[in-house]
Image: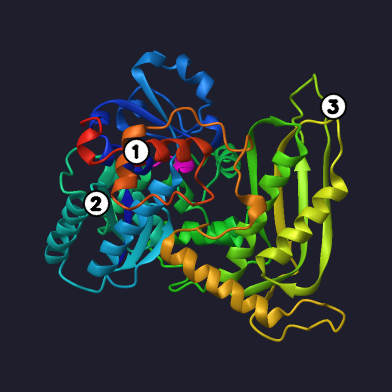
Amino acid sequence: MYGLVDCNNFFVSCERVFDPRLNGKKVVVLSNNDGCVIARSNEAKAAGIPMGCPAFKIKEYTDPRQIIQLSARHILYRDLSDRVMKILSQEVENLQQYSVDEAFFLLPHEDVETSHRVMAEVVKKVKQYVGIPVSIGFAPSRTLAKVANHIAKRDPRITDGVYWLVRPEAIDIILRRTAIEDVWGIGRRLSAKLKSRGIMTAADFVKMPPSLVRSLYSVTVERTQRELMGHDCQIANPVDIAHKTIMTSRTFGKVLTDREEIADAIVSFAERTARQLRDEGSVAGSIMTYVRGDRFREDLPFYSNSCQLQLATPSSDTMTIVRQALNAFNNIWRDGFGYRKAGVMALDIQHGGGIQLNVFDPDDHGKLRRLMTSIDSINNMYGRRSIKLAPGIQRGEWSPNQKHFNTMSQTLHFYTGMIDPHSPDSTSSDLERLDSIEKLEDLDQLDPL
């Protein structure tokens, strides 16, 4: 029996943990640069605001003055996610985190009534310890567990957040009520193809011959169908596959024309890429830097280009990768253009040992590895980017355009020891806010909730 734990309206719930004034309000969380809606409260859903709705179109669904729009705080969400997963890992076995707010686990064969009481207590514990509401759905397969979890969230008759989709007759009824586009693994294009064949619900999809599903679509779609039939077709313990490429990129808050500001962004991206390489125990054989303009600006010519350079010796050293990323950037920089996005990518990645050294490479790679190990240890202890390269100290106009920060949640998040002011995810407005907070003598000077 598979269980799926899913945090309800996760990003909104995170904001409400630190700002209870948001409870009962129409709240949406916006993507980077405040572009579109990526999370909605139940009240916002009831107002008809769809997921992915551009921020400027919210007024088409309801009075904008009645909607609270918040810029995403991914540092906060990641920390609260870690807390939720830590509690879950203490309560259940074989926990496999699927996303920032979802995790599967395998429930041993126990009495349903006993397991239900235990799982209901888990829901209460997560809410009490972290403040995040969660729902748990149980079913014979992961795809059905997603359906069960959806019911646990939406059905008002379920008051303890736990739902079991086990009996065949119950599964049949639920599948007849589930639209084909709502099935996990059935995307928009595939659902349109299925509807053209008269497949409108999950029950209709289950009735199709599996051989026909495979011949018309793919073996992956057939697995989804068999999962809806109650068969477990997923890999029980998926093996983490090391990355073949690693890229760090960002869309700037506005179009930039200053070379130094974009170079500052390149340094930051290269640092993050190098750190991720070391976290995976990998090295890169080449580094690519790219820049792109804004094709929607008619007053500026559009320009996009990239440059890939080989490293003399495969490396994960920050200084080596930053140097090569800047060299590539200098090769593609052109004056007179406006730039809206840039990124750094590590390619030709090698994992483990067996690195071929270059006799003509002047760098002492053993010394560099020891230096990076020391820097990573200090940053892990005192916060990311506590030690950083001098070119990456300044954080300029390339930061995302986020104007709807919830200062209450940001402040309390910092005081609970969860915000890292040195994180590369922190924006310039973050640092200004933290500077003002540090001038306070104690928490009593903060605005009350």
Residue nearest the viewer, comparing 18 with 67: 18
Q: Amino acid at mark 2?
A: Val
Contact between labelled residues 2 and 3, with CB atoms less than 8 Å apart:
no
Of all residues shown, which one is farthest toward the bottom?
Answer: 354
The disc at residue 326 is none
* Magenta stretch secondary structure, dominant: helix
Q: Secondary structure at mark 1?
A: loop
At label 3, counting other C-alpha atoms closer than 10 Å, the crowd grade (few under 14, some 14-19, many 20 or more) is: some
Q: Amino acid at mark 3?
A: Pro
Instruction: Name the residue carrying label 2.
Output: 130
At label 1, counting other C-alpha atoms closer than 10 Å, the crowd grade (few under 14, some 14-19, many 20 or more) is: few
Contact between labelled residues 1 and 2, with CB atoms less than 8 Å apart:
no
Answer whether residue 8 is visible to the viewer in this image. no
On screen, 57 above or below 257?
Answer: above
Contact between labelled residues 3 and 1, with CB atoms less than 8 Å apart:
no
* Lower sequence index among marks 3 and 2: 2
Residue plotted at (56% across, 40% down): 188
Q: Secondary structure at mark 3?
A: loop
Instruction: Name the residue carrying label 3.
Output: 301
Left or right of residue 333: residue 448? left
Residue range (magenta): 178-182
Whole-number angstrom distance, CA of label 1 to CA of label 3:
45 Å
Residue nearest the viewer, comparing 279 with 443: 443
Instruction: Name the residue carrying label 1.
Output: 439
